[in-house]
Image (cartoon, rainbow, N blue to C red):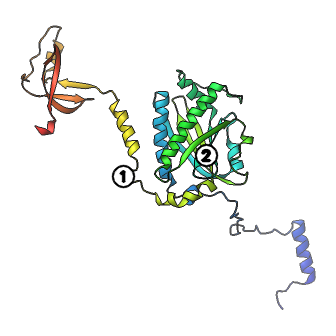
């Protein structure tokens, strides 16, 4: 057969390939299969629990309100990540010195874990006791005092209350604070290789971002998986408590109310010649309505006068009612 190499030619070719005299063509590996572990791969939260982002959004809103009320100033709260991880990997991510609060979710079986970042914990303690929310520049792991542990329990109870409220639209669950541990090695809410649902929340009290994390074994959430998937939209009346809380905050907000008694156009020359004691005539008559403004926006019409020796304005209508 023509084109067939002789044994001598084959031996020479093999020797040349071994010695490097014959160049070898680079093997194209772009189409080779990539190993994929179907059992051990960490999975997407959105795939496993579709609709859970609605619960997260509500939790963030409630935490923002609760923390702001606790420290007396506006607090920024946002979700940084929501992941499914092996418990050993989540535990290795915990910051040294983080107080770890165990909690149960009744009637589900098993415990969850709430970890406060040391910076967040110290900032909250400082705020609660009248400080500016400053945390030590270096936070070395140590035993916390009884007062600090009481504050941790208070904060954990607050967060768990908001978590329970956020889940109320999906299922009636009760989150119960159990205890606080400082050593992650003695906290076992799942086996090292088991998957846990983790939620990292970033909080900013005005001194830089800090964080807290929540961890739940995936097995705990199995009974409510289908219910979560069905709650992709929020019913109109489902968030009534949030609306009522916002209403209460708005009612306690201070606003500036002003009354415009009249206007007059003047030239720049007339304005420059004004002195103390000069009188300005305005075209508004005593019985004519004047504009009542809230934060600079006209909201009502009123009649100017006096009441018990003080200047006053009697509200008569809204502008559109005239």
Q: Which residue is mark 1?
A: 236
Query: How many callouts does the rendering have?
Result: 2
Q: Position of residue 124 (x, y in %)?
A: 56, 29
Instruction: Name the element at disc 2.
Output: strand
Q: Which residue is mark 2?
A: 104
**Left or right: 243, with 172 as reference point:** left
Q: Nearer the viewer, residue 254 or 113?
A: 113
Q: Residues within 10 Å of mark 2 (few under 14, many from 20)?
A: some
Instruction: Name the element at disc 1.
Output: loop
Where is 209 relative to 216, above or below?
above
> Which residue is rendered at x = 87% and y = 83% of the image?
5
Q: Position of residue 44 (x, y in %)?
A: 59, 57
Residue 18 lies in quadrant: bottom right
Where is 190 relative to 278, above or below?
below
Q: Residues within 10 Å of mark 1 (few under 14, many from 20)?
A: few
Quadrant (top left/top right/bottom left/bottom right) for the N terminus:
bottom right
Residue 27 lies in quadrant: bottom right
């Amino acid at each position: 057969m023509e084109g067939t190499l002789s044994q001598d030619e084959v031996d020479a070719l093999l020797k040349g390939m071994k010695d490097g005299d014959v160049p070898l063509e680079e093997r194209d590996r772009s189409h080779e299969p990539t190993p994929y572990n179907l059992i051990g791969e960490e999975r997407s939260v959105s795939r496993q629990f579709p609709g859970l982002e609605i619960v997260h959004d509500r939790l963030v809103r409630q935490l923002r309100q609760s923390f702001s009320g606790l420290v007396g100033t506006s607090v920024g709260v946002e979700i940084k990540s929501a992941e499914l991880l092996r418990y050993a990997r989540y535990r290795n991510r915990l910051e040294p010195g983080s107080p770890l609060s165990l909690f149960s979710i009744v009637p589900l079986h098993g415990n969850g874990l709430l970890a406060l970042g040391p910076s967040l914990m110290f900032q909250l303690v400082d705020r609660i006791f009248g400080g500016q929310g400053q945390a030590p520049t270096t936070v070395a792991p140590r035993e916390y005092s009884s007062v600090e542990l009481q504050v941790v329990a208070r904060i954990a109870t607050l967060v768990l209350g908001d978590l329970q409220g956020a889940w109320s639209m999906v299922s009636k669950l009760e989150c119960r604070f159990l205890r606080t541990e400082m050593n992650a090695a003695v906290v076992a809410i799942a086996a090292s290789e088991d998957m846990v649902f983790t939620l990292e929340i970033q909080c900013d009290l005005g001194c830089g971002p800090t964080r807290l994390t929540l961890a739940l074994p995936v097995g705990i959430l199995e009974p409510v998986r289908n219910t979560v998937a069905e709650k992709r939209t929020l019913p109109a009346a489902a968030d009534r408590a949030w609306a009522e809380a916002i209403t209460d905050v708005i009612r306690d907000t201070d606003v500036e109310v002003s009354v415009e008694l009249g206007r007059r156009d003047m030239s720049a020359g007339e304005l420059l010649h004004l002195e103390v004691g000069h009188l300005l005539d305005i075209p508004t008559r005593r019985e004519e309505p004047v504009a009542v403004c809230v934060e600079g926006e006209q909201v009502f019409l009123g009649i100017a006068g006096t009441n018990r020796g003080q200047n006053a304005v009697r509200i008569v209508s809204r502008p559109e009612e005239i």
